[in-house]
């Protein structure tokens, strides 16, 4: 009878140990998931910052040139974005590094970006891709940013500019 009680106590210890390991694993996965979400959100915010910086440069560019810069002339926005850029023809390398480029995605704020000129240069859309897990597509116009909140980014999301 003494052996049976010892066996039950040993089984209880094994079950408690097993349940403890499962609980620790669940807590670990929760922390990892929360950290990944914050890292993705940070990447999204850096990309939106780069694209909205381009928006500010576009608004300064139109005052002097009476039209917005398009993708072909985006290097001319450098003069309005980067303090050390004094060239009226712009600073292409600086603009690429400031907002993003497909050639150096590890150091870019966005994986890519494109400026689309609309209405004969009187309007524009700036689109870019955030380097987060969803590759969130972002659109900036003179009036709006879409998606406004990272919660709206989903896998295989089709971006439409407002």
Image: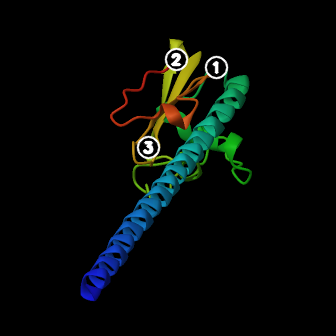
Q: Is residue 7 above or below residue 19?
A: below
Q: In the displayed structure, does residue 63 sit left or right of residue 136? A: right
Dot 1 alpha-carbon crowd within 10 angstroms: few under 14, some 14 to 19, many 20 or more: few
Most distant residue in the bottom direction: 2
Q: In the displayed structure, does residue 90 sit left or right of residue 100? A: right
Check if mark 2's residue and mark 1's residue have beta carbons within 8 Å.
yes
Dot 2 alpha-carbon crowd within 10 angstroms: few under 14, some 14 to 19, many 20 or more: few
Residue positioned 63% across, 32% down in the render: 55
User: What is the secondary structure assignment of the residue under circle 2?
Assistant: loop
User: What is the secondary structure assignment of the residue under circle 1?
Assistant: loop
- Name the one closer to the observer, 16 or 154: 16
Q: Residue 159 at x, y = what percent?
A: 41, 26
Residue positioned 58% across, 29% down in the render: 148
Q: In the displayed structure, does residue 41 sit left or right of residue 22? A: right
- The CA span between labels 2 and 1 is 9 Å
Most distant residue in the top direction: 119
Q: Quadrant of the N terminus?
A: bottom left
- Name the one closer to the observer, 121 or 128: 128
**Label number found at residue 50:** none
Mark 3 sits on what residue? 112
User: What is the secondary structure assignment of the residue under circle 3?
Assistant: strand
Indicate which disc, 3 or 2, sits on the residue closer to the N terminus: 3
Identify the image quadrant of residue 21: bottom left
Indicate which disc, 2 or 1, sits on the residue closer to the N terminus: 1
Mark 1 sits on what residue? 143
Q: Residue 81 at x, y = what percent?
A: 68, 43
Mark 2 sits on what residue? 162
- Name the one closer to the observer, 129 or 78: 129
């Amino acid at each position: 009878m003494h052996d049976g009680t010892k066996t039950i106590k040993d089984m209880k210890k094994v079950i408690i140990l097993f349940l403890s390991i499962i609980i620790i694993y669940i807590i670990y996965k929760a922390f990892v998931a929360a950290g990944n979400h914050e890292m993705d959100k940070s990447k999204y915010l850096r990309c939106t910052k780069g694209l909205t910086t381009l928006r500010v440069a576009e608004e300064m560019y139109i005052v002097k040139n009476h039209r917005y810069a398009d993708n072909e002339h985006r290097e001319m926005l450098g003069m309005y974005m980067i303090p050390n850029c004094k060239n009226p023809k712009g600073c292409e390398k600086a603009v690429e590094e400031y907002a993003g480029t497909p050639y150096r995605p590890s150091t870019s704020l966005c994986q890519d970006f494109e400026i689309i000129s609309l209405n004969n240069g009187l309007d524009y859309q700036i689109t870019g891709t955030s380097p987060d897990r969803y590759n969130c597509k972002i659109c900036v116009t003179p009036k709006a940013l879409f998606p406004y909140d990272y919660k709206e980014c989903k896998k295989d999301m089709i971006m439409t500019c407002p």
